[in-house]
Amino acid sequence: MNAQPSILRRLSATLVTVSLAWGVAVSAVVWLAVRHEVDELLDNTLQESAEILHGMLALNATQMPEAGTWPIPVPGHDEHLLWQIVAADGRVVLRSHKAPAPPMTGRRAAGFFDTDGGGRGIAVRFDDGGRMLYVAQSAETRIEARLEAAEITAGCALLVGLACALWLRTRVRGELAPIVEMSRAVAAFDPLHPQAALPPATRAELVPMRDAIDDLASRLARRVANERAFAAQAAHALRTPLAGMVAQLALAQRHAPPQVQPQLARTREAANRLARV
């Protein structure tokens, strides 16, 4: 026999599903907003880095070579910002360790630009001689920043959703406890006992059910009382004629010939059994 569906399990499954769906939806919405803010923050970082580099490199502008593609002489390291100083004729004068040898863009005006590899850069006029400073972030750097923000956002939203689902499940279990208590009270309830009574309902939703059970018990008790009264009246009404029948059979048995005595004895015994019933 198949088990009946459980209200608690169905509500718990619904709460978990809704909470997880809410977490995913919130994560998507928040991510759209966070991605815009992350991109804006990265662009601000690019601009500020370009301004700092411009100030530092401008101090040694007189010692800078006019042309060349060699990187600045520093130990190898993991660069998140790539930069170049490009002369007016398009030749790279100086670049960072991992910056490409050719110019990152042909842009000759200040402002943001997109690199060929999917990165993001900013162009700053370096001097009056036409040299430009290009500072860029690689696509990997920007994607990594976006992914970290997305992971944190989605993780927090899902955790909050799961915590809410668990809390709501506990609350639902507590709210369903009065139903279990009412079921136990009904199982121990004897409607035929004079002092039997159901405990008052502890939830407003259980009041109609408790009243319906109490009304059913009252009707059942009245019906049983009526049946008992009818049985008592019927027994009283039948007892007198049966007593007369037994007396008449006894008299007939006393005066009957011997050949009919067995039949009269059996009839008298049957009448006595009926009277006892």
Image (tube, rainbow, N blue to C red):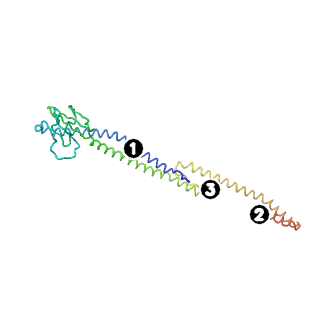
Q: Residue 183 occupies which quadrant of the picture?
A: bottom right
Mark sitting earlier along the chain (1/3): 1
- What amino acid type is highlighted by mark number 3? Pro
- What amino acid type is highlighted by mark number 1? Val
For the residues labelled 1 and 2, say whether their Cβ atoms are less than 8 Å apart: no
For the residues labelled 3 and 2, say whether their Cβ atoms are less than 8 Å apart: no
- What amino acid type is highlighted by mark number 2? Arg
Q: Residue 186 occupies which quadrant of the picture?
A: bottom right
Find the residue positioned furthest to the bottom.
258
- The alpha-carbon separation of the residues under discs 3 and 2 comes to 33 Å
Q: Please give the residue where the numbered disc 3 appears in the rendered image.
A: 191
* Whole-percent x, y for residue 71 in the image: 16, 42
Task: Determine the secondary structure under disc 2.
Answer: helix
Q: Is residue 191 above or below residue 65?
A: below
Task: Determine the secondary structure under disc 3.
Answer: loop
Q: Is residue 93 left or right of residue 151?
A: left
- Residue 98: mark in rendering: none
Find the residue positioned furthest to the left.
63
* Quarter in which the C terminus is drawn: bottom right
Q: Residue at x 33, y 44 (%)?
A: 150
Mark sitting earlier along the chain (1/2): 1
* Whole-percent x, y for residue 219 in the image: 65, 51
Q: Is residue 259 left or right of residue 146?
A: right
Mark 1: few/some/many CA within 10 Å (<14, 14-19, 20+): some
For the residues labelled 1 and 3, say whether their Cβ atoms are less than 8 Å apart: no
Q: Residue at x 70, y 55 (%)?
A: 227
- Residue 273: mark in rendering: 2
Q: Please give the residue where the numbered disc 1 appears in the rendered image.
A: 24
Mark 3: few/some/many CA within 10 Å (<14, 14-19, 20+): many
* Whole-percent x, y for residue 33 in the image: 33, 39
* Whole-percent x, y for residue 32 in the image: 34, 39
Q: Is residue 90 left or right of residue 199?
A: left
